[in-house]
């Protein structure tokens, strides 16, 4: 499924990666120079440029970057040096608007301003506000345990300012009050932002930020366990259906098409996300080249934990071991459909009718399992082939394309499936079947949007017709790319289809849907797809086909509607945080300004 409901376009930039330490150091140098220039250039302003650059801005920021992590660690938190440097840069950025306003007032009416030491201490309130809200989320969700690390930067700056200017005693009191205002505003923001998820799920959403970052960036086992415990609280056991189609040659199993009724989410590597790679690894060499296309299901069939994935994978591996050898010369057909733009095409492959569903060239996305199960029950007959559905998931438009039970699209799908299966039966004939496989991998997820299983081609030569299936490990395909890729395959196969796995590992690049083609050009993708199919054609060998299915009992999945609840809460959290962020920043500034006026 595309994740406009699972992560949403408005959440797509929430997951950011810290720049390298050298990049952050460069930003710190520029930031310190800018602030020093605002207070000290041209020569003659209250703060000499070098004094401000080194003593007030750069050295305290470096001290904070070096010490914040160790202080946080002593109190049970964790912050890498890379994140600590980024925190110093971003916290310091909140001083720039205040410094710019000070500079404008100084030029217009210099006699109205308090001493420069007081203004420099004034800056520490917004800095503490930002540092504490950040450390509370990414280091330790405890005010008491995060505050010492939050104070490292402001206290280092305060010490430098007080040493350089030796102000009157009253300024020390002002400095303490500025910091108190910053802390209280930060606590107020955190409380407001935490309310939606705490109200809906009874747990702190802010407390999940650190595990989320640690899972995405480091695959930290403890972080993964924390997140999976959260998901597991909202799961329920079901009997999962798994179907395998196995192509066996004289040298053993050549390829396996695995069709578990599992959605490859929720995201990153949690639960059943990264399903294609992980299931292929579990099936091992005994399964040959493994294809795990998307089956008709949505986020209600996400697996919440690694233990649930293991249960499903073990049952699938046992099904593979129990399958018979299959038949050399069972009935087979081409991939066929009825009408100019059918929602479904079918191919008979011995004991199974493989049905590929897509609404392309219109948008196409998740298919409710309830929309296809009655169709399969109606078409399956004793002694006839089983019906195996694949959701091609290959034409992305945000917020469009879901196929739900009872909708006009579902009714058309039922008609098209029935017509396609009956046509495939009518043209099927007994005879040898050859298949070939081609694999292209090693793609950069960040650069291409293609997951670790890469691009896989399965070419089926049966009933005098060559059919090519291309499976891309990604979450949907940019609208229009399917037609271009199929056109590139026209000389190689009579019929073809482009599929994606819907692997939700691709979301961790930017927190968004990241469909294939958003980061990778259609020309480059056409070359890779064609190369995979050419490899598969060169690999064609005779096979016999076996298929079977099994229900794996008591596998937990997310409860129906849970994802919608979570996304609604995330949307409320984002809205609340955005509003509270602006309001509390202004609160820090106005409250500190009132203190300035009171002490003048």
Image (cartoon, helix red, strand yellow):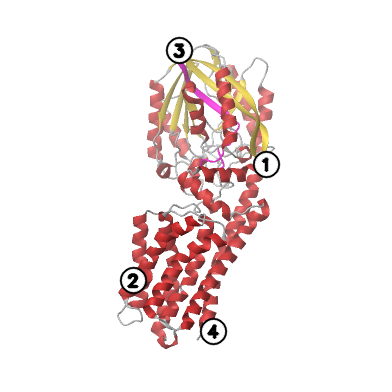
Mark 1 surroundings: few (<14), some (14-19) or many (≥20) residues within 10 A: some
Alpha carbon distance from label 1 to label 2: 57 Å
Quick check: 517 above or below 178?
above
Q: Residue at x 31, y 83 (%)?
A: 44
x then y, percent, for residue 482: 47, 36
Mark 2 surroundings: few (<14), some (14-19) or many (≥20) residues within 10 A: many
**Residue 7 visible somewhere in the drawing:** yes
Pointer 2 residue = 53
Q: Which is more N-terminal, label 4 or label 2?
A: 2
Q: Quadrant of the N terminus?
A: top right
Secondary structure of the residue carrying numbered label 1 = loop
Q: Which is more N-terminal, label 3 or label 4?
A: 3
User: Which of the two residues, 208 or 98, is positioned nearer the viewer here?
Assistant: 208
Pointer 3 residue = 250
Q: Which is more N-terminal, label 2 or label 1?
A: 2
Mark 1 in CB contact with mark 4 (< 8 angstroms): no
**Residue 346 visible somewhere in the drawing:** no
Q: Residue at x 49, y 83 (%)?
A: 170
Alpha carbon distance from label 4 to label 3: 90 Å
Pointer 1 residue = 560
Q: Which is more N-terminal, label 2 or label 3?
A: 2
Q: Is residue 382 magenta?
A: no
Pointer 4 residue = 598
Quick check: 225 above or below 578?
above
**Region in magenta:** 250-271
Marks 1, 2: nearer the viewer = 2
User: Which of the two residues, 267 or 131, is positioned nearer the viewer here?
Assistant: 131
Q: Residue furthest front?
A: 74
x then y, percent, for residue 83: 43, 56
């Amino acid at each position: 499924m595309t994740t406009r409901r699972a992560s949403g376009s408005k959440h797509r930039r929430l997951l950011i990666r810290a720049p390298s330490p050298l990049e952050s150091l460069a930003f710190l140098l520029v930031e310190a120079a800018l602030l020093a220039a605002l207070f000290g250039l041209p020569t003659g302003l209250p703060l000499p440029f070098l004094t401000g650059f080194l003593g007030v801005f750069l050295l305290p920021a470096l001290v904070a970057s070096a010490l914040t992590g160790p202080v946080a660690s002593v109190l049970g938190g964790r912050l890498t040096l890379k994140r600590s440097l980024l925190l110093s840069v971003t916290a310091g950025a909140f001083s720039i608007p205040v410094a710019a306003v000070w500079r404008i007032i100084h030029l217009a009416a210099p006699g109205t301003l308090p001493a420069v030491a007081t203004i420099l201490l004034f800056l520490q309130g917004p800095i503490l506000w930002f540092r504490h809200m950040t450390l509370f989320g990414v280091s330790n969700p405890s005010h008491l345990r995060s505050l010492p690390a939050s104070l490292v930067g402001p206290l280092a700056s305060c010490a430098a300012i007080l040493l350089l200017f030796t102000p009157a005693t009253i300024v020390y009191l002002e400095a303490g009050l500025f910091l108190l205002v910053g802390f209280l505003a930060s606590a107020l923001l955190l409380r407001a932002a935490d309310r939606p998820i705490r109200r809906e799920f009874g747990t702190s959403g802010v407390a999940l930020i650190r595990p989320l970052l640690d899972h995405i960036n480091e695959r930290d086992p403890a972080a993964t366990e924390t997140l999976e415990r959260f998901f597991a609280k909202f799961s329920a056991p079901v009997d999962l259906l798994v179907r395998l189609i196995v192509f066996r040659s004289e040298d053993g199993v050549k390829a396996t098409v695995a069709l578990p009724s599992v959605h490859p989410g929720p995201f990153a590597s949690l639960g059943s996300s990264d399903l294609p790679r992980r299931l292929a690894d579990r099936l091992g060499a005994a399964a040959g080249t493994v294809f795990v296309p998307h089956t008709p299901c949505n986020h209600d069939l996400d697996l919440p934990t690694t233990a649930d994935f293991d249960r499903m994978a073990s049952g699938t591996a046992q099904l593979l071991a129990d399958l018979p050898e299959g038949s050399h010369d069972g009935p087979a057909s081409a991939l066929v459909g009825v009408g100019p733009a059918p929602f479904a095409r079918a191919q008979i492959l011995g004991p199974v009718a493989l049905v590929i569903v897509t609404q392309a060239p219109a948008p196409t996305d998740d298919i409710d399992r309830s929309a296809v199960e009655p169709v399969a029950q109606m078409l399956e007959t004793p002694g006839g082939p089983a019906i195996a559905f694949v959701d091609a998931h290959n034409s992305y438009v945000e917020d469009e394309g879901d196929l739900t039970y009872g909708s006009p699209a579902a009714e058309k799908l039922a008609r098209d499936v029935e017509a396609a299966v009956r046509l495939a039966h009518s043209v099927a004939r007994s005879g040898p079947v050859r298949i070939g496989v081609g694999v292209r991998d090693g793609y950069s997820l960040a650069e291409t949007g293609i997951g670790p299983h890469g691009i896989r081609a399965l070419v089926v030569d049966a009933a005098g017709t060559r059919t090519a299936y291309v499976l891309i490990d990604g979450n949907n395909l940019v609208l229009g790319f399917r037609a271009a890729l199929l056109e590139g395959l026209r000389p190689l196969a009579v019929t073809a289809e482009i599929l994606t796995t819907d692997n939700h590992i691709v979301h961790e690049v930017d927190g968004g849907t990241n469909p294939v083609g958003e980061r990778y050009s259609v020309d480059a993708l056409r070359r890779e797809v064609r190369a995979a199919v050419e490899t598969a054609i060169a690999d064609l060998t005779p096979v016999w086909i076996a298929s079977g299915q099994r229900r794996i009992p008591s596998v937990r999945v997310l409860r129906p509607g849970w994802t919608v609840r979570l996304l609604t809460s995330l949307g409320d959290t984002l809205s609340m945080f955005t509003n509270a962020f602006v309001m509390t920043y202004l609160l820090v500034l106005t409250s500190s300004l009132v203190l300035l006026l009171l002490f003048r």
